[in-house]
Amino acid sequence: MSQHSQALSSHLQAMKFEMELRGYSPQTQSHYLCHLRQLEKYTNKPALQVSPDELKQFLHHRIKLGISYSNINISCNAFKIFFNKVLSYNWSDDVIIRPKRPKSLPHVLSKDEILSIMDQVLYLKHKTILLTTYSSGLRISETLNLRISDIDSKNMLIRVNHGKGNKDRFTILSHENLKMLRLYWRFYKPTDLLFPGLVEGKPIAATGIQHVFKVAKDKAGITKPATVHTLRHYVEPQIMESITQKSPRTA
């Protein structure tokens, strides 16, 4: 192994160590290391040898390529950790410059559009997953990783474990949602994970539910670029009642 490879490996390992200390998820660690490698490829040198001007040129290059704000923002997060915590360079925001966040409104579905989509979701399991996501303002990954013990019907709360930022929190459990969850439990009898998938100990895949939502949206004739995540932007109790009054299939 060359001296260059040893230096590179050493600093990437130091970066990984720093992220592990901070409790970053494996996915975040992988993303941050990927952005450091992209910087090294652009400058053709190890990241620890990159100058402030070279870093700014790299960020400018990516902006000119039309790379999304969120992607460049991840780069800046990675560089803040590497240059300021691992290497102690203490570079300011005038060096690690974040582009201005573009202003855009989320694609919000109307009451009628949500009802139309839910009418096209045929199966109880799928409808319960989407209703729980919608009613409690959850991310689909958070819904699918729920366990039976996370449903607190006494206090009408749902416990979310290891949500965004690896943080635990509580969110609301509506009476209509609880009714459907109880109906779902009577038919499927889950014992630990609320929505178990085909692989033992693993929940249903998020891609499957996203596909169900897309198919239902297309059948309902909704052309907005809405996804399951869109459900988090708008909740109305009357919609919940209308959805739970329908009788979905159980298999």
Image: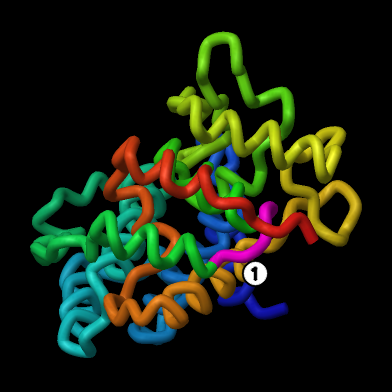
Looking at the picture, tell me which residue is in the foreground, 162 or 15: 162
Tell me, yes or no, if residue 37 can be seen here: yes
Element type where label 1 sits in the image: helix
- Residue occupying image coordinates x 86% and y 47%: 201
Q: Relative to 22, is 171 above or below?
A: above
Residue 19 in view here = no
| Apparent side of residue 202 relative to residue 233 in the rendered image (left or right) | right
Asked which quadrant contains residue 78, the reply is bottom left
* Residue at the spot 52% in from the left edge and 27% down from the top edge: 168
Percent position (x, y) of residue 187? 81, 43
Q: Main secondary structure of the magenta part?
A: loop
Q: Quadrant of the C terminus?
A: bottom right
Q: Position of residue 52 (x, y in %)?
A: 20, 66
Q: Position of residue 216 (x, y in %)?
A: 50, 73
| Residue 158 falls within the magenta-colored stretch | no
Colour setup of the view? rainbow
Q: Can you say whether 107 is above or below 4 in the image?
A: above
Q: Residue furthest right?
A: 200
The magenta region covers 121-125
Q: Quadrant of the N terminus?
A: bottom right
- Residue carrying label 1: 208
Q: Quadrant of residue 189?
A: top right
Closer to the camera in the image, 103 or 57: 103
Amino acid on which disc 1 is placed: Gly
User: Are there few (<14), some (14-19), or many (20+) residues within 10 Å of tag 1?
Assistant: few
Identify the residue at image location x=21%, y=86%. 66
* Depth check, front residue: 50 or 222: 222
Is residue 123 in the magenta section? yes
State the image coordinates of residue 222 (x, y, percent, origin top left).
Answer: 33, 77
